[in-house]
Image: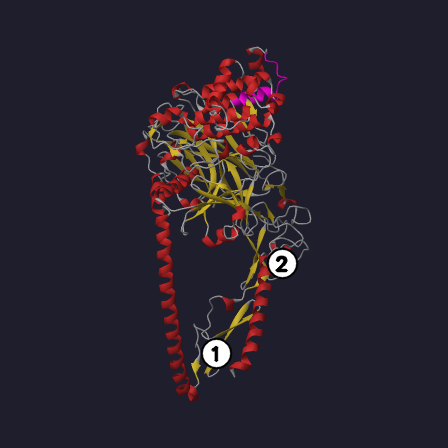
Amino acid sequence: MALHSTPSQLISLVEILLIVATAATAVSAIAKPGCNDTCGDVKIPYPFGTTSDCYFNEDFFINCSYLFNPPKPFLWHSNIDVSSIGTNGSLEVLFDVTSDCYDVKGKPDYVKSITWSYLYISKFNVSNTENKFTVIGCDSYGYIKGSIGDQIYITGCMSFCENETSVYSGSCTGNGCCQIDIPKGLTQINVSAYSFNNHLSVWEFNPCTYAFAAKKNQFTFSRGNLRNLTQNQFPLVLDWTIPINETCEEANNTSCYACKENSEHYEREDYTGYLCRCNNGYEGNPYLSNGCQDIDECLNSNNCTHTCINTEGSYTCKCDEGFHGDGRKDGDGCIPDTNQFPLIKVALGVGISLVVLLLSSAWLYLVLKKRKLMKLKEKFFRQNGGILLEVELSKRGGSYQTAKIFTAEELQKASDNYEESRIIGQGGFGTVYKGFLSDGSPVAIKKSKIIDKNQTEQFVNEVLVLSQINHRNVVRLLGCCLETEVPLLVYEFVNNGTLFEHIHNKDKTPTISWETRLRIATETAGVLSYLHSATATPIIHRDVKSTNILLDHNFTTKVSDFGTSKLVPTDETQLSTVVQGTLGYLDPEYLHTSQLTEKSDVYSFGVVLVELLTGKKALWFEKLEGQKSLVTYFLTSLKQGYLFEIFENRILKDGNEEQLKEVAQLAKTCLNVKGEERPTMREVAMELDGLRKMHKHSWVNAQLNQEETEHLLHDNSNVHNCGDGSSITMGYDSLKDHALVVLDDGR
């Protein structure tokens, strides 16, 4: 019997799988056939669309701009940035935070201030149930203005506090933060922020007032927001409906009725229009033809005790052979037939016993196997510094889960089982492989060569440092893997090699001009300046060299290898450490005193500058005794007036003589033996940026007098146009009520 039933059972199983796959494909459709259902990372469900053939009417036009990478969707022909669209009548856009900032003397800080932000959406409404208006500050108040029909609506809230310790995180009731509801029916919104007394009494911990309208649960107030609100945009929920001039019943009889097969319409309270939803037993997009597909209740939890039979829009229950009844849990269920009860009882008893035995054995095997695997992964987790990483990140309020946690199998497959031909270099504590993820994107996988405590600490240190960094010229950490015998880090892949190769490899040297070298130096200096002064905790790289400066196909700089970097507590200017670095680039003062400071990076960067000028390596042992050190060779040549004789020929051909002298002098100051006599990386970055701009815009008349310059820079207007539809007001009266400015479809 079993041999004859097996083929038919397999055929039935295949048919069921095909039906399920077909249904899943139908349900997954969200856009009209032949239309794009995404723009960048945002899904675009019908009735919305990116072309006239793909949307219901012009109210639902999404302008997908390919000027960005990835592309960005905008509402209509405006600059309103769409972040999410739902078929339930909601749409999320990004709305700017307004700020009012002052310096310690109570004077307006126009650089940080964004005096007001607005949104004009005549076709949709700002949701009063999904959004809140929030004001943050201890000397602060804010207004929200808008239009409801032909009426102007204005409301606001005030926020005070005497000192920072009196403010409680999570509370937004007026002490450091206030929050109110948004009224129904707003088609226009204008938010402004002000201060009562220019933050004079609270400036030390609260220099700014912040005001914004945002989706509920997208913002949780914390005491740290008083010092700085890092987020400059929040999602704002808009309500939309299908517009009609008739009632829903009348619209149902017209050709423009939006609800398709197996769906129904319903009205929203206080809205002139309707929405569509799938009938009970169906799911999908109700605005598409055949968009609502039957739900197979038999694949999910249902009310049947024995057999479930799916029907269009519903299901029925059936009892197995030898039973009778309605087969429903909430009904009679399935009752055994009287004449078969003893036999069925025995069969059920034996069958249940066998099933229980098999299940128990399988469960025990799986439990033991899972426990063994968990112990092995826990061992590797501890061995790879997972506990240390958790402790250090908890001190800094971070989490390693912000990056993707890759499995060992994913990275093994990506690197072709760590094939030797995939090796692209040596990292600070291991080997770097080129790999390809499942979506085809290239990555760099860094793998430890051996396991020891020192390399575990370097692995943890690199994750900690990179978690503090957000800079376009730093190699981005994509994730890590802790469940393998050695720790693994996964980075973005930079495809054009290292700066060292382009300077010293004869095959690549002709391709890198002086202008490109100066830009690479400027970008590298900008990264080091950012590490020293712009991160939450200052960072000293400690191993700046040309092999740690990667280049992409556009020769854009990507600084890498933070395995030996140090996070510097804000109350310390130098650290006593074991000396680490690379000979030829190592700060001599740090080498002799073991006192690590930000100026140690300045020295190493000075060596890189000399490499860019001369095309010579930091150390080369085949030369004469006085020429083995590039720094000594450079400084001696500079002192004796032989500077242009040591420059690389390509540099002399491409470079401006005065500009080359300026860069050489800058390198000299970076290479001062005493750290206190070296400039900061911020000063170096500004100097290099100035040299680039001077070279780039040589047509600028340097003799423009100060009065003319100020006249050109400070026109009579007090409004600066940002170029994206928004503007920053350079002067205002914080207590004067401003007239509402309406700009068509702008923000």
Q: Report the front residue among 184 and 652.
A: 652
- Mark 2: which amino acid? Lys
Question: Looking at the picture, how far across and down is residue 475, in whole percent?
Answer: 50, 38
Residue 365 higher or lower than 604, as above or below: below
Q: Is residue 478 left or right of residue 368?
A: right
Q: Is residue 696 magenta?
A: yes
Q: Residues within 10 Å of mark 2 (few under 14, many from 20)?
A: some
Question: Looking at the picture, how far across and down is residue 740, in whole percent?
Answer: 54, 30
Q: Is residue 11 magenta?
A: no
Instruction: Tell me the tag on residue 319.
Output: 1
Residue 447 visible, this angle: yes
Give the residue drawn at x 57%, y 61%: 24
Q: Is residue 318 left or right of residue 382?
A: right
Question: Looking at the picture, how far across and down is residue 440, in whole percent?
Answer: 57, 49
Residue 360 higher or lower than 283, as above or below: below
Q: Tell me where residue 604 sits by quadrant.
A: top left
Which residues make up the magenta segment?
688-702
Q: Residue furthest left?
A: 165
Question: Looking at the picture, how far across and down is residue 74, in whole percent?
Answer: 60, 41
**Residue identified by numbered label 2:** 260
Q: Report the front residue among 459 and 404.
A: 459
Instruction: Tell me the tag on residue 716.
Output: none
- Mark 1: which amino acid? Cys
Query: Disc 2 or 1, which lies upstream in sequence?
Result: 2
Indicate the quadrant containing the C terminus: top left, top right, bottom left or bottom right.
top right
Q: Residue furthest bottom?
A: 339
Give the residue drawn at x 41%, y 83%: 347
The label nearer to you, 2 versus 1, is 1
